[in-house]
Image: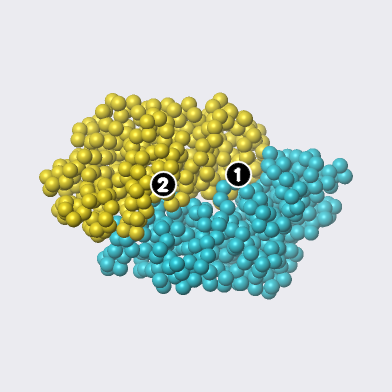
Chain colours: A cyan, B yellow
Amino acid sequence: MHISSLSTPCLLLEQKTLDANVRRMLARAEDTGVTIRPHLKTAKSAAVAELATASKRFGITVSTLLEAEYFARHGFDDITYAVGIVPSKLDRAARLMADGVDLKIITDSEDVVTAIAHHGAAFKVWLEIDCGDNRAGIPAGSQALESVASPLLSETTEARLIGVLTHAGHSYGVDDRTAIARIGEEERSAVVHAAERLRAAGHEISVVSAGSTPTALFMENTDGLTELRAGVYVFFDLDQQSRGVCETDEIALSVLASVIGHNRAAGKLLLDCGGLALSKDLGANSFRPEIGYGVVCDIETGKPYDCAYVSSVSQEHGHVKVADETLYEHLPVGSLVRVLPNHACMTAAAYDRYFVVDSGNVIAEWDRVNGW
Amino acid sequence: MHISSLSTPCLLLEQKTLDANVRRMLARAEDTGVTIRPHLKTAKSAAVAELATASKRFGITVSTLLEAEYFARHGFDDITYAVGIVPSKLDRAARLMADGVDLKIITDSEDVVTAIAHHGAAFKVWLEIDCGDNRAGIPAGSQALESVASPLLSETTEARLIGVLTHAGHSYGVDDRTAIARIGEEERSAVVHAAERLRAAGHEISVVSAGSTPTALFMENTDGLTELRAGVYVFFDLDQQSRGVCETDEIALSVLASVIGHNRAAGKLLLDCGGLALSKDLGANSFRPEIGYGVVCDIETGKPYDCAYVSSVSQEHGHVKVADETLYEHLPVGSLVRVLPNHACMTAAAYDRYFVVDSGNVIAEWDRVNGW
């Protein structure tokens, strides 16, 4: 089936581009000698996870317990839930372990560590370390590090601290590879230092986990790390492109949309992909304001039209400011476009499936797990 | 079941508040003598549609054909699909009509009108009029009005132009009721003028449809209108509150979230509701920057904590800047909060269900239809 038979808006995934992106990260893991633990928060798809793990179903990362449950059903049994857990979610986590999942949970809170230690299940815990992102995590140099972890040294609990994890979210604040590499080194040195301190305190730390797509790709020294986590690299997006992490033609994900109107008086063309179909993420615009909510491309070549981007959105309308009047002729009402997403993780979340495409034809339909 | 037993994040709907909001709009319809055609793009829920139509299942508005199909399955047979249709969607629309739905479709495009006229099905068409919003629609004074509509006068087609529709999206650009009323009058006069011109051209225009939540509530003169459309009024949100349309305690929708971390070094508290759980909509911030992605409230009283709002988000993390250190004591890690949404339509779209709540207890679970 040709993509022109699909009902719009819908999500297209270019198989060849996806394959190349996955190979790039697997090659990077080979080069560095550090395992990649793909973060499935972007794709939320078992089919993508199969590719990202080279069909070996090795360790993956997830951002919700629902994802963990979904991937467990699809045969993935080494899963890190990489968002700080709370006591009320421990029973759900323990059920996954009872079902055979080698689950890892994370926290940076003394109260949560205490709850984990008293729960009764043999949780495998990773401590979250802040490497400069200022989101979650204990700073690697903090005096609190050992005290937060100490309940997991107790002989009265089977729960154990076995890893440390950090995420350099601030690698999204720069747009050149030298700066990304510098942040990658901050990330590495912070989490390795935390691991050393916790080992000295008596914990058997076997996992030292760092990563984000930018730092996983451009970090220069991986000494002391045992794994890299990255997610959006499977699809890439304009957010990554704007930061110099990928090229536009490496973006595997797009939204297929219809032109639903020409408003020549207002100088705009309207698409049936609005804030719900694209998301309202404007992350890429810090470095490239001419991205808006997404860039409009030809459906056959996948190439962007000149200066055509979704400059504003309402719920179901994407507004494309028309800089060159010939765009109206290229794109009559009823014609199709592909819109490259500003931020793939946010855009994909509005859909329950991917239409996998090769040479303009749908060759597969893959599901996604949304929600919590 | 008390809401504290729910897994976070999830969507709460306060039944009493919802009921009051629905009654307010039904009373408004009674006062003005103009029917309300609820826009279900916000709620996407048959249970809410039942309430909004006072169990009479009178005419509703939808923003996707999937919504139309869902509501048709739930016994709603008078449905307006209020986003410009394209030729490729006409077969799907015709199937709904074949299944007994009195479906109305809209467009502002001569090419689409021609395709509708040649399709073969007896489509009921409403022409979209631009009343100053500059999104979609033909300006009421445009010379093109009659020519765009003319194929629907032909005796060779059963499709007919029976209505005109406008939406004053620019009513969201002001924050006082006088200004809203003024825009409401622009909306009314534009669509009534278009109806008169089209009647003069020979079309039997029986529907003159205007509306947005702000203008439907505060428009002073409704002469010539046959119906008002509004959607977000069922839930309200901070976007409406910031524009003076509702009070904070009239917001029926909230996200139940857990505190997953205290990052005292960075002066923030972290919630498990990030960009996916809240959306990245910042519409309310035009008038009230201290709303961020949502305002943090006590789960029992529903009242906002002082100066506590989600100031930034990553995919699964909501960051609350802590202005007053006592917030850490009020909200230990693992405790629950309710977050009032910046924009209800966008926030609700991340969830497949509502937990309907009265006095802190879940009294029902209602589904939603997402996607296209």
Determine whether label 1 and label 2 are within 8 Å by CB: no
SS label for mark 1? loop
Residue at left offset 20%, top offset 35%: B224
SS label for mark 2? helix
**Horizontal side of residue A192 vs A356, given as left or right:** right
The amino acid beneath tag 2 is Glu
Position of residue B214 measured from the top left corner of the image (x, y, whole percent): 33, 36
Q: Nearer the viewer, residue B232 or B34?
A: B34
Residue under pointer 2: B69
**Residue B184 in sight from this viewpoint:** yes
Residue under pointer 1: B272
Position of residue A125 measured from the top left corner of the image (x, y, whole percent): 75, 50
Looking at the image, which residue sits at the far right?
Answer: A155
Residue at left offset 49%, top offset 29%: B15
Q: Nearer the viewer, residue A185 or A283?
A: A283
Res. A110 image quadrant: top right
Q: Earlier in the sequence, mark 1 or mark 2?
A: 2
Q: Chain of mark 1?
A: B
Q: Chain of mark 2?
A: B
**Horizontal side of residue B12 vs A309, given as left or right:** right
Q: Nearer the viewer, residue B124 or B208?
A: B124
Query: Crowding near pointer 2: few (<14 within 10 Å), some, many (20+)?
Result: many
Is A182 placed above or below B162 here? below
The amino acid beneath tag 1 is Asp
Q: CA distance from mark 1 to mark 2?
A: 33 Å
Is A229 placed above or below B123 here? below
Residue at left offset 72%, top offset 57%: A78
**Horizontal side of residue B329 vs A121, given as left or right:** left
Res. A231 image quadrant: bottom right
Position of residue B154 measured from the top left corner of the image (x, y, whole percent): 16, 54
Res. B288 image quadrant: top left
